[in-house]
Amino acid sequence: MKYIVFDFDGTLADSTAVFASAWNTLAQKYKFKGIELKEIESLKKLSITERSQLFDFPMYKLPMILPQFYRLYRQSLHDVHLYDGIKEVLTEIGKKGYKILIISSNSQENILEFLKMNGIHSVSNVLSSTRIFGKDKVLKKFLKDSNINPSDVVYIGDEQRDIVACKKVGVPIIWVAWGYDAIEAVQQEQPEYKVSTPHEILTII
């Protein structure tokens, strides 16, 4: 194994409050249902399709919404925080000689600024998927461009769509329990590994 690839939101960064705020701003503008923070835990058990139905949000509008969403996100970047223990895990992985990447649906600009703000220098590259369900294509291109096998990589993410993307390209995944999808939403996809604390990532690696 040579590369450790992380998702960003829900895996490295706790952006729950910022996500909810940005969503609610757009909900008011486009007349779909907003999110209350007290609903977050129950939402984690639902699929993306189920969430879109609950909020009266048609999925075909995602390409229009996402650029606006991440611009609003950037305005509140100071309210996004690293999960406890993540910085230490990144440092330790770097010391072991692995290359660390981030592949996320969030914008490269947002992520790079966040890493700078938090003094994280161990990440060698940030790749952004312009489509929320496009991570498999980004992973596949990364494997091809780097001339490496799927077995040379492990992906660490928190959502069902992360697991599905990894399965498509044959990359093993470590699912983290502290993110946006609860075990009820991901267990049928059968991730290779599951962790409930950041330190467990080091044990698996």
Image: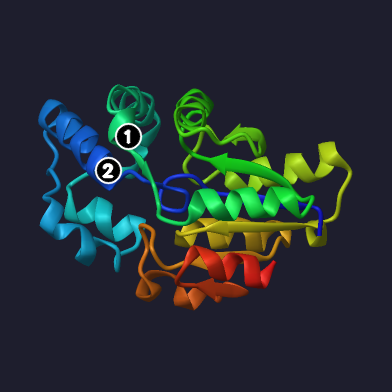
**Coloring scheme of the render?**
rainbow
The residue shown at (56%, 61%) is: 164
Q: Quarter of the image containing the N terminus?
A: bottom right
Q: Is residue 67 above or below residue 142?
A: above
Q: Mark 2 points at which residue?
A: 58
Which is nearer the eye, 88 or 114? 88
Residue 184, percent from left and from top = 36, 75
Say whether marks 2 and 1 touch (CB < 8 Å): yes
Which is nearer the eye, 119 or 78? 119
* Left or right: 205 in relation to 160: right
Residue 41, percent from left and from top = 22, 64
How far apart are the two marked residues, 2 and 1, measured between alpha carbons? Answer: 6 Å
Name the secondary structure under disc 1: helix
Say which amino acid is labelled 2: Pro
Say which amino acid is labelled 1: Lys
Residue 201, percent from left and from top = 59, 66
Q: Residues within 10 Å of mark 1 (few under 14, many from 20)?
A: few
Q: Quarter of the image containing the C terminus?
A: bottom right
The residue shown at (89%, 43%) is: 147
Residue 8, percent from left and from top = 49, 45
Which is nearer the eye, 100 or 126? 100
Q: Residues within 10 Å of mark 2 (few under 14, many from 20)?
A: few
* Left or right: 57 in relation to 107: left
* Left or right: 35 in relation to 13: left
Q: Residue 171 carries which label?
A: none
Name the secondary structure under disc 2: loop
Q: In this view, does 121 lie above or below 172?
A: above
Give the mark count: 2
The residue shown at (60%, 42%) is: 102
Q: Is residue 184 above or below residue 107?
A: below
Q: Mark 1 points at which residue?
A: 61
